[in-house]
Amino acid sequence: MTGLDLDRAIEAYLAYLRVERGVADATLGAYRADLEDFALSRGAAAGWADGPGVAQRYLAARSRRGRRGDPGLAPTSLRRRAASLRGLYRFAYGDGLIARDIAAQLDLPRQPRLLPETLTVAEVEGLLEAAGGDPRHPRRPTASDGLALRDRALVELLYAAGLRVSEALGLDVEHLMLDAGLVRVIGKGDRERVVPVGEVAISWLARYLAWPRPAWLAAGGAGDGPGSPVFVTARGRRLARARAWAVVKAAAGRAGLGDRVSPHTLRHSFATHLLEGGADLRVVQELLGHATISTTQLYTHVTGERIREVYSRAHPRA
């Protein structure tokens, strides 16, 4: 097959992912970058369909680390690159573009088991206090008061419900059930779950929803009905992911936690604190929206490390 055949196969595969699988644009972009890099590699255009050799040599070359000008890919990036190739080959075989099931002969590099970064309860409390404090409302509230309220409500919700930042920013007003202490979340794969929210976070959300959110929506000419975003800018637009990251990073800096904290750190801490408090692993899986229990089990290793640390400090013969 010619190089054009490989290019066409890649485009057909990406179209399949977009149309039939509903893959997000960001994920499609990552797949495209991976596969276009493969297409430009030595021998790919001429021999990609003949057997696994071309893909195996490509992955081997990308795994080399430490060479001048070619540091290689990190294990997680290499695994994603291999998954992209396997997906392409599986599609091409199923669609009759190639005669051999090459995907079955491509092994995924072993996934490194990285323990998530978590905070102690005291560190979380310090971060939450630093996210907006308790702004006083004079007779004419200032814009900075409104920003502080929104930021505090956002960070409180991230920790109280263990949400991904994309899930929090994707919330519309009809997803909130504050009277019942619940929030309806649309997670990965459009999986829906209902998560309880504690009284403290509900209180901050209620204050923010009362003001400044309505004023910001009105200033932006937006309505406050179904489909209206919960977290908005002062111009009434849905809050961007980069801004949410900046809010958490700034609060972490003020709390003296350095640069090791991200919005996802609050999600990790949420899960770890629940397990340390005796929550059932299956319940935590449901709250986090994990498709499989194996993902949630990672947190049992974190709590195990905490137990060992306490034992080492407390036991006289540790």
Image (cartoon, rainbow, N blue to C red):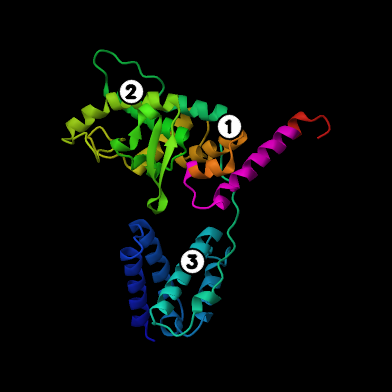
**Which SS class for mark 1?**
loop
Q: Which residue is mark 1?
A: 120
Q: Residue furthest left?
A: 221
Q: Which dot, 2 or 3, sits closer to the camera?
A: 2
Q: Which residue is mark 2?
A: 207
Q: Which residue is mark 3?
A: 83
Q: Residue at x 49, y 49 (%)?
A: 290
Q: Quadrant of residue 153?
A: top left
Q: Residue at x 54, y 37 (%)?
A: 269
How far is mark 1 from mark 3, CA to CA?
35 Å
Bounds of the magenta span? 287-311
Mark 1 packing: few (<14 Cα in 10 Å), some, or many (20+)?
A: few
> As shown in the figure, which amino acid type bears the numbered disc 2?
Arg
Q: Mark 1 or mark 2, which has the lower sequence index?
A: 1
Q: Magenta region's main secondary structure? A: helix
Tell me, yes or no, if residue 249 can be seen here.
Answer: no
